[in-house]
Image (cartoon, grey):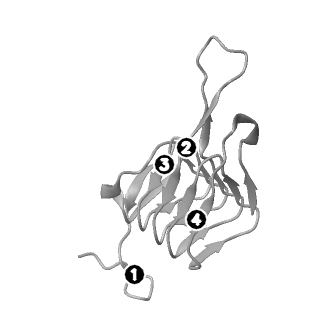
Amino acid sequence: MNFYPHLLDGLRGYLHCSDMKYIKPSVIFDLSADITLGEGIIIAEDVILYTHEHDHSMGSNHLKVWARAKVVGSNVYIGARAIVLGNCTHIPDGVVIGAGSVVTKSIHKDFSHTIWAGNPAVLIRPRFPTDGKGDFVLT
């Protein structure tokens, strides 16, 4: 895991997480603001979680940086090489982010237990329970 804040811009955050997590190597956490991870989270290889964005407005030689805290709910799975940008401040419980996806905005709490994928990530479908043998149980 790699951690970096934008110290030159005076931004510094912390990683808050429970012991109940599985984070693969080479995940990058941008700690320009706090990141809170829920229990049972799985983050695959090469995922990047950004908390900062740059102000792209005209009138400055230096692009100002701003940061927002990010909360990732419990039992969330983020697939390999996914990128979660700074504008995304919340991922609700039970969400699956597909490998290689780019999450550009927060996912509303009403969309817990859903699957998101693509660039930009869009809703694919709800997660369905299985019967333990891999077959979906539609209720």
For label 4, count other residues whose C-alpha is less than 10 Å away and answer few (under 14), some (14-19) or many (20+).
few
The residue wearing badge 1 is: 135
Distance Cα–Cα, label 3 vs label 4: 14 Å
The circle drawn on residue 119 is 2
Q: As shown in the figure, which amino acid type bears the numbered disc 2?
A: Asn
Q: Is residue 45 above or below residue 118?
A: below
User: Element under label 3?
Assistant: loop
Q: Name which of mark 2 and mark 3 comes first in the sequence.
A: 3
User: Element under label 4?
Assistant: strand
The circle drawn on residue 89 is 3
Q: Is residue 11 above or below residue 38?
A: above
User: Element under label 2?
Assistant: loop
Q: Is residue 138 left or right of residue 120?
A: left
Q: Is residue 115 left or right of residue 54?
A: left
For label 1, count other residues whose C-alpha is less than 10 Å away and answer few (under 14), some (14-19) or many (20+).
few
Q: Contact (CB < 8 A) between labels 2 and 4?
A: no
Q: Name which of mark 2 and mark 1 comes first in the sequence.
A: 2
Distance Cα–Cα, label 2 vs label 1: 28 Å
Q: As shown in the figure, which amino acid type bears the numbered disc 4?
A: His
The circle drawn on residue 16 is 4
Q: Contact (CB < 8 A) between labels 4 and 1?
A: no
For label 3, count other residues whose C-alpha is less than 10 Å away and answer few (under 14), some (14-19) or many (20+).
many
Q: Is residue 53 left or right of residue 96?
A: right
